[in-house]
Image: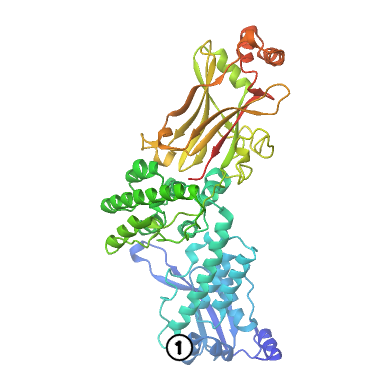
Amino acid sequence: MSSPFRSKVARLWSSKELSDCSIRFIVDASSDGEPQKRQKTQENVGEALPAHSFVLQLSSARFKYALENTRANNDGQPELSVPLQQADELPAACDALRYLYTNTLASRGFRDMLLVRRYAQQMQLSGCVGAVDAMMSSWLSTRQHDSLELYACDHLFPADDPEAGEAGEAGGAAGAGTQQGKEGVGFRAVLAAAKQQVVRHFGDALAVLGRPELQAQALALPARGLEALLEADDFATDDEASVLLLLARWVEARRAAHSPVPEAVLTRLCRLVRLTRLNSAYLTFVLPRIGWFAILPHELAFVLRYAAAAATHAAASTAAAAAGPAAPPPALVAGGGGGGALCEGLAATMKDEYKMGSPWYGSPRRQALPSGGRSVRWHVERSELQAALASGAKTYLQGRFETGLGEDGGAGEDGAEGGDPHKGGAGAGAGAGAGGTTVLTARGLEWGVRLRTVRGGPAAAGAYVKCSIPAPFAYVTAGLAVPSARLIVFKWRAGRPREVAYTLELGSEAEAVPFGRYQGDAHALPLQQLHTQTQPSQAAAAAAGAEAGGEGAAAQLSAWGEYLHEGRVHGELVFLPN
């Protein structure tokens, strides 16, 4: 169509010039009275829209058929009707019709654009659906609009199978089904762009679970949005248990909001968790106890067997890699396996019984932790230590983490921040969120640091790591978990840089931590005795004593002189990749 002609057609939009038909918008309404006696009626919405039959016939098979079979109104012109689901959707229907004239779209948000798409499909407006999809894809790829906004409108999405659209009206153009198929392909491109953006936004499971504002956004996602996140290979995690915990918190949030998840939807979401990559604590103690998780007992038994075979192969591969050149990582695809000959044999044997290509048996996700691990600084305030020493009982002091595990600023590739006292950087100073949480979420569990003091007790203090089960799985009352972590406590001596006073390695089954219990050393931190103090230690004790406000408290605090720095005991908890 030539540009001058297109311009003239555009000027005809909503104009009575050359108008030879009209479009009336209607909405269903019900009469008052008892529900069983109510009668549906149709009400007009807005004024009739002047239209032009040559534009409608060339652009819409539905309108072409309607114009050939519609009686004229009182003015002698055909009057076409467009049903609306709600009166406030009139602007969207008009925008779809405007496109026929102007080749442009005026809507500026996903809700409005999805409504335009719906009415364009309903009215079979040539090219409009594709234009809507192209614009929404552009918004997402250029980040003009947020994918979270799109997923918030998932109730307006076309059918799950875009190629299986509703049949057109009787007499509709031949090939309408093919056109709907093309439209479905366009919307799949929109969803693909949204998926890329939502994965970029959330990053990895550790970030989601460790940052309250990000977790709130994830828990507010509709099922389609969460599905896009969980099925993405680029959605990284420290362990698949963190992904399952995220799903559990989402299910819990839905139930708390009195919006339970339909069984079919929940089954689909459960299928996206890579079960055979769960850690042993979740496979043994958590997964078998989740009542809502859609898995049959006999397949659960097979999952446990397959996971054990995969873990054995992974351990052997790790040992081989340590002895020689590292092998390239396996492809991160669902059903990718990578579990060695035994896993291949199990998969071949059971392929007709179970869906071996599903994510349940897939390769591990991208690792969210750097190779050297990620450290999070913690501290105990001197005032808390003072109060504990003043008590007459054994006291466990909670370390407060200064950043979240999902935040940047931890160990790098060489793990320098994991405890090298001679290197500065993020691991050495105070971080954002100082004085914050006492719990970190990793490997699907909650972890904390504890220092133990005993007034008048042994000449050493204890240092421990505590493991807790998250709230969605509070019914799991017993179990063991390997944190794959390193606990560090620092000390300072006069004229020397920061030193590592104590290190606790928790990386093997022998160092597993019981749920709700501690793992550590009661004699981790030797305490100074008054008669052996050096002059600098005595000075530190004097300063501590001045704040303590008493000779007894000063004596107790003086024993901690090497560990107190700038009013705090400092340390790090380093989480290492499996």
- Say which of 208 and 12 sits in front: 208
Q: List x then y, in percent, for residue 272.
A: 42, 57
* Residue carrying label 1: 173
Toward the front, the furthest residue is: 324
Mark 1 crowdedness (10 Å alpha carbons): few <14, some 14-19, many ≥20: some
- Say which of 420 and 87 sits in front: 420
Q: List x then y, in percent, for residue 457.
A: 51, 12
- Say which of 129 and 443 sits in front: 443
Q: List x then y, in percent, for residue 523.
A: 51, 20
- Say which of 449 and 489 sits in front: 489
Above/below status of 414 relative to 184:
above
Q: How has the structure been colored for display?
A: rainbow
Image position of 388 (left or right of 302): right
Q: How many marks?
A: 1
Above/below status of 495 relative to 325:
above
Above/below status of 298 relative to 471:
below
For the point 45% across and 28% down, the residue is 518
**Regarding mark 1 in the picture, which secondary structure is present there?**
loop
For the point 45% across and 47% down, the residue is 319
Query: Where's the N terminus, which quadrant?
Result: bottom right
Q: List x then y, in percent, for residue 215.
A: 53, 47
Q: Is residue 252 visible?
A: yes
Q: Is residue 249 visible?
A: no
For the point 73% across and 23% down, the residue is 495
**Residue type at the position of mark 1:** Ala
Q: Quadrant of residue 444?
A: top left
Image position of 393 (left or right of 378): left
